Amino acid sequence: MDFLKSAVASAISKGPAFGYSFGDRVDIDESIWTLHNGTKREDGSRCSIFSFDVNANKSRLPLARNALRKLRTLRHPGVVKVLDTVETESYIYIATERLSPLSWHVKRKSLTEETTKWGLHNIAKTLKFINNDATSVHACIRPASIFFSESGEWKLAGFDALSSMKEDDAVLPTYGSLIPDSHRYMPPEISKGGWEVMKQNPAHAVDAYNFGTLIFEVFNGSYGGSEQLGQMKSIPPSMHQAYKRLLNPNPKSRISVGQFLDQGKRNGGFFQTPLIQVTDDIENLGLKAEDERNELLGKLDDVADDFPADFFKMKVLPELLKSVEFGGGGAKVFGTVMQIGAKLSEEEYEAQITPVVVRLFASPDRGIRVFLLNNLPMMIEHLPQKIVNDKMFPQMVTGFSDVAPLVREETVKAVLVIVPKLSDRIINGELLRHLAKTANDEQPGIRTNTTICLGKIARNLGSNNRAKVLSAAFARSLRDPFVHARNAALLALGATADLFSEDDCATKLLPVMVPSLVDKEKIIRDQAQKTVDLYIARIRKYAASMPDSVLPPTGPSASGATTPRMGAASTENSWTGWAISSFTNKLTAASGQMQSGVTNGSAQRPSSVPPVPTNSKPTVPASAARPGMTLAKSAAAIPSIKSPDPAAAFNDDTEDISGDWGGFGDDDNGFGDAASSVNTKDEEDPWGTPSIAPTTSTTKSFDDDGEPDFAGWLAAQNQAKKPVTKNLPKGLAKSGPGSSTAGTKKPIVGGRPTSTAKKVIIPPPKKEVKKEEAKSTEEEEEEGWGDAW
């Protein structure tokens, strides 16, 4: 084999330029030609090369030259397509489309009846053209002269003896006997009288007889001689009558191949098969009406298993793509395209289907857009990521804002299919912005599908803003008036629970899920119970692993005993025990003096009197720390001290997390027209980051009948220098104008005089509102996703 290749290459180098390279040799039946697989040097495309060695077979050189001349001039869809030819004194090369011998399949009996009829139909059409239009005789019809093209079609070759009866120097009468294996296929009249007899008979007689032997051989797998032709068991019964007329011993009584073809195409004829009808109609698919097109596609589905797969790729698929892109083929045609595309290799898919799909996504036709989105799951695996990011997605995103709700909904659904092919920059940027809009769509179904989409693509989101985006989006959906949107939010929260930290689960997500436990719809209540239980179980597991306390251990007291912990008193069994022991422990450890604002043990201090600051050290009498002290007695002896601002005690360095609650407020729905009747306080924030309005507190104090009178206390401080002579409690009367100790020498604490008195000035409470607002603004600037969602 290597020697043959080198010899061929040497011959080519000495002759005219031939732009094709020889490959493996292909085994064929007896022939004057040697067949090789080849490739075109320019682009590497595949081809076949017929070679004839002049020096090794000079006697048959006229047949080879006749074949070369006829193939150059004869053009028909059923004839082998010639790419290039070269003729020298030592060789003849004919480069054609890539072919495979029909004889391979005939010997293996691998052809179905429908496929065989389809192939015979193609050869019959070609012979009709040769006999009638070209007025010629092929005289070499047999499996060895027929080949499969890359599209699976039967193509006719073997033009060695092709002759026109109008030619004076016709090859057939002179060199017909040199055709390999001619005696086996020779008609009876030629066997008796030689090739000169053919001039006395109809021109079609030889080819008609040979076509009859071809029918027998392709249905039986082999042909040994004319004595077998009467065995018609394997031939379809519908062809028996016409088959016999082809093999009539009298050449003048034989029907032509053209007549055989016409009989088969009559209503109910043997060539009236779906496979043949589809082949004839597929080329005109773009010109057919919608009803005719749908009928043809129905037939195409029926014969999909009988058709050679290559025929679908090479012939049917291009016509279908033309129909979709230019002929208004619609969804049914595109569905057939996807079925064929599933059988293509990656290279074939990228070459044939991908360019058309990219062009279709740019089409303004909404019908085509919906067809593409519906069939996206079937094509996404074949599309390169660069094509999806750079060409398809920019066209696809227009569907998020389309005026047609169907297009918007299908676009949201398609996100699940396309997101594995998108880059992280697109997913966490442009895609999330579009989903933020559809989450507020006026159509409840689109809002619901957006929530489902977010839950399913949650793990594709960036870890930096994933929890923020999802928590805000799901919290907003929990307030949706559409019941299925709320249910989708609960299901999504359950599916993505592992993506949130335990702190977020406890402080952000559970508070917004708990109201769903009393939802008006039972389906929501049931699902909320499952989701809340899931989060509670996770939080309990996390809490069990936490330390008992993060506070540093307290040192021993001055007396050597450790300070009791609040709530640790073992002598108290009731829930008030910790409060009693707490007061007792504080009184026991207190030292110094404390200025009292009461005149007797039973009266409470006025609300205008400021509380004692924490850095003062009041002296408590020993009797105040008596063991066994009851709550009533201690309440009478100890004035009730109330902080000017209850939040001030927790205002040291605690971070303000108001900005993290974007979407967790309950005064904003933001679901378009559908939710306008539910809540009228919608914000412009796409994901619902409502501003929490201050509310008027109605909580009453436990030691007086209202909040501490800070304004009155401030007014009293401003009037401190003015003489006060009326309505002062006993022990606080002033002795002179402007004197804080005029009425008495010693201040009274708990009804007893003390040795010294200090003037205590407590500054007015700071306004914390501005600080909180400043922190909220700062946090919103840091966490930009709170605004977007």
Image: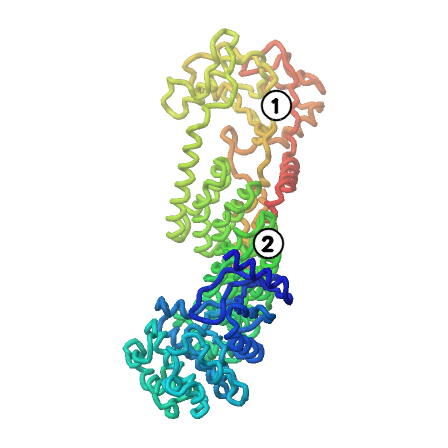
Q: Which numbered disc flags the more N-terminal residue, 1 or 2?
A: 2
Q: How many marks?
A: 2
* Residue under the image location 39 percent in, 48 percent down: 527
Identify which amino acid the numbered label 1 is placed on. Answer: Leu
The residue indicated by pointer 1 is: 728
Q: Secondary structure at mark 1?
A: loop
Q: Secondary structure at mark 2?
A: helix
Q: Residues within 10 Å of mark 1 (few under 14, many from 20)?
A: few
Residue placed most toward the observer, 681 or 670:
670
Outermost residue to the top: 559
* Residue under the image location 53 percent in, 52 percent down: 419
Q: Position of residue 242 (x, y in %)?
A: 35, 86
Answer whether residue 111 is visible to the viewer in this image. Answer: yes
Q: Is residue 567 above or below residue 540?
A: above
Instruction: State left or right for residue 321 relative to residue 122.
Output: right
Residue placed most toward the observer, 55 or 745:
55
Residue placed most toward the observer, 351 or 81:
81
Q: Position of residue 657 (x, y in %)?
A: 58, 37
Instruction: State left or right for residue 763 relative to residue 45.
Output: right
Answer whether residue 631 is visible to the viewer in this image. Answer: no
The residue indicated by pointer 2 is: 386
Q: What color scheme is it?
A: rainbow
* Residue under the image location 37 percent in, 86 percent down: 192
Instruction: State left or right for residue 236 relative to residue 307.
Output: left
Identify which amino acid the numbered label 2 is placed on. Answer: Lys
Gap in angstroms between the C-alphas marked 1 and 2: 87 Å
Mark 1 against mark 2, which lies toward the viewer?
2
Q: Position of residue 5 (x, y in %)?
A: 54, 59
Q: Is residue 769 above or below residue 495?
A: above
Q: Residues within 10 Å of mark 2 (few under 14, many from 20)?
A: few
Q: Position of residue 552 (x, y in %)?
A: 52, 19
